[in-house]
Image (cartoon, rainbow, N blue to C red):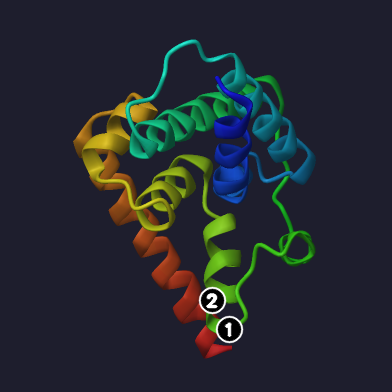
Amino acid sequence: MEQQIYTEAVKRNSQRVFLLALSFTRQRQDAEDVMQTVFLKLWKHPVAFTDETHMDKWLTKVTVNESRSLLRARAREPISYDELEALGAVAEQPEERELIAAVMQLPEPLRAVIHLHYYEDLPVKEIAALLSISQAAVKMRLVRGRNLLKSELMEGELK
């Protein structure tokens, strides 16, 4: 891969890859490690990409796979909202902050599907392929994740 193309790809995709890895790993250092591994693999990737969309899909798949590999190796503690805030990964609006915090508290299978669908704008079919699960499982996890988020956010309004 040419250095100029690589540099542009890193600049364009760093935040997206980092946030996707963070949604899986829930740890800043682990997300940084995953991001570094992903971009190292991109540098070593021998095949030319047909377009930016092809590269984006490849980066998403490699990020998901690397994140899952890391999780298999270690048990994770939940990331705190303060850590998210320190990362600059939170929105300005209080409602958005509350939503991000609630998403980060979801169990990993639900959190992954919610993140890929709503933050990465991936369709159910692509999520199923990325996570090696059926489309029905993706849909069920979306329903369960939305229900948990709804109950968590409604509970917060009552307090």
Write the residue at 53% across / 82% down. Answer: 95
Task: Inspect the image, locate mark 1, and give the three-letter code of the amino acid beneath it.
Answer: Gln
Dot 2 amino acid type: Glu
The answer to whether any part of residue 24 appears in the image is no
Picture layout, residue 127 above or below residue 1: below
Name the residue at 59% across, 14% down: 44
**Image mark for residue 67:** none
**Cβ atoms under marks 2 and 1 closer than 8 Å:** yes
- The quadrant in which residue 92 appears is bottom right
- Residue 57: % across, % down: 38, 34
Q: Residue at x 24, y 30 (%)?
A: 134
Give the number of callouts: 2
Q: Nearer the viewer, residue 60 or 14?
A: 14
- Depth check: 116 or 58 in front? 58
Q: Outermost residue, bottom direction?
A: 158
Q: Quadrant of the N terminus?
A: top right
Q: Which residue is mark 2?
A: 96
Answer left or right for 69 relative to 132: right
The quarter of the rendered structure image containing the C terminus is: bottom right
Give x and y (percent) for residue 21: 60, 40
Image location of residue 94, percent across then percent down = 60, 84
Q: Which mark is residue 93?
A: 1
